[in-house]
Image (cartoon, grey):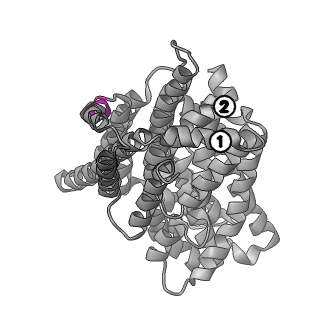
Amino acid sequence: MLIELLPLVMFAVVCLVLMLGYPVAFTLAGVSLLFAGVGIVTGTFEANLLRTFPSRIYGIMANYTLVAVPLFVFMGTLLEKSRLAEELLENMSRACRALPGGLGLSVVVVGALLAASTGIVGATVVTMGLISLPTMLRQGYHPSLATGTICATGTLGQIIPPSIALVLLGDVLSNAYQRAQLAQGVFSPDTLSVGDLFIGALVPGVLLVLLYLAYIASVAHWRPERAPAAPDQGVSKTRLWLSLLPVTSLIILVLGSILAGIATPTEAAGVGALGAAILALAKGKLDLVRLKEVARSTTLTSAMIFTILIGASLFSLVFRGFGGEELVESFFHQLPGGVFTAMLVVMAIIFLLGFILDFIEITFVVVPIVGPVLLTMGVDPVWLGVMIALNLQTSFLTPPFGFALFYLRGVAPESVPTGAIYRGVIPFIVLQLLVLCTLALWPTLATWLPQQL
């Protein structure tokens, strides 16, 4: 019985070691090798399985889809370091201050654009916290509303394309979808592309942004003291549009080329990286020193992602070698309620793991384990990917362990109590749960647009 549960014990040990603060990639690889060694000694693990690991590493390095990761990271980092996003937010804020809740509305709009360009929760929350939180507090916004808006907006990078999270999730689900079809005897399997996931996430992402805007507008209407208007600073419409046009055009170009079928996500990412560099040069905000900073930051982030992917690949190999996939499949098929209960359990597990693991670890470790089983049971891969992204977004926002809360706490003034941050995100969590439940009841919100295109 203990041998049968060994894969779950290995997963639990990985989570425990991560909670102790050890690096993710080396924890995954180290624990996997330790359990593989024990399995070889006890005769419960086939040593020849480890010989396939080099080919797995080569497969990761030769994966054309994953080339989009450093390119999207470069684009987002360049927009941040060149202060193009900050300039956009400042002009939007000045133009909208005279409206009740105008500053909050501009933070959501610009935050959504920034999230779409970076796709990394920490970077967006920290950037928005440093730029907009002091302004919102000076204008008289209630601390709960200000911090809640920034935290919620910062997590939009999980669901709004083009997003690094969706790129990684799409690649993992594509592999899981092919394995699921092969397990069912389908030897000419359908394919799932990252572009399909981008298109599927578009409607839920836009719906979430609209709900955020509606909530802030309602607060400004019914409780104007929480989101007061400020004197109009006389920003011309020409200046506003000149600040809006470059960044929005870049994102529309990247996403539009994917939606129109003109470019793959990897090719669109190359266009985005080049476009961001041209914008920064045109604005006079890109020199050799700043370019070195962007290149260094992009290299560190990309290296971290791919090192975790290699460690997760070794973990997945050892997990399957111990029969973990069959164990998970047997567990899901024995659950009462079929697909509904299986999805509910998976969503609950991913939500809880979001408190201790980042989206990269969950995407590379958890999704390859549960994904093939759910897809074998008939779950639509696009719908599953969007549900996971929304679920993680909610988890990163939920007190007391949500990552977004910790990121904002690190840059927020000491005058803003932690309790205010926790209270501020609750309405946005309700809105996200509303979208998540709506998507669960009507999967066509995610699947209709990809089918049409």
Q: Secondary structure at mark 2?
A: loop
Q: Is residue 184 left or right of residue 118?
A: right
Q: Secondary structure at mark 1?
A: helix
Q: Are marks 2 and 1 in contact (CB under 8 Å)?
A: yes
**Residue 77 visible in the snapshot:** yes
Give how far across and how far down residue 126 sits, in percent: 44, 66
Q: Is residue 212 left or right of residue 116?
A: right
Amino acid under disc 1: Phe
Amino acid under disc 2: Met
State the residue position of label 1. Answer: 332
Up-down relation of residue 30 to residue 19 (above or below) = above
The answer to which of 448 and 89 lies nearer the viewer is 448
Q: Is residue 282 left or right of residue 403?
A: left
Give how far across and how far down residue 210 sits, in percent: 70, 50
Give how far across and how far down residue 431 sits, in percent: 72, 57
**Residue 162 visible in the snapshot:** no
Residue at position x 38%, y 44% in the image = 44
Residue at position x 63%, y 48% in the image = 346
Q: Is residue 241 magenta?
A: no
Up-down relation of residue 94 to residue 10 (above or below) = below
**In the rendered structure, which segment of residues is drawn in magenta?**
58-62
Which quadrant is the C terminus positioned in?
top right
The answer to which of 188 and 273 lies nearer the viewer is 188
State the residue position of label 2. Answer: 377
Q: Which mark is residue 366?
A: none
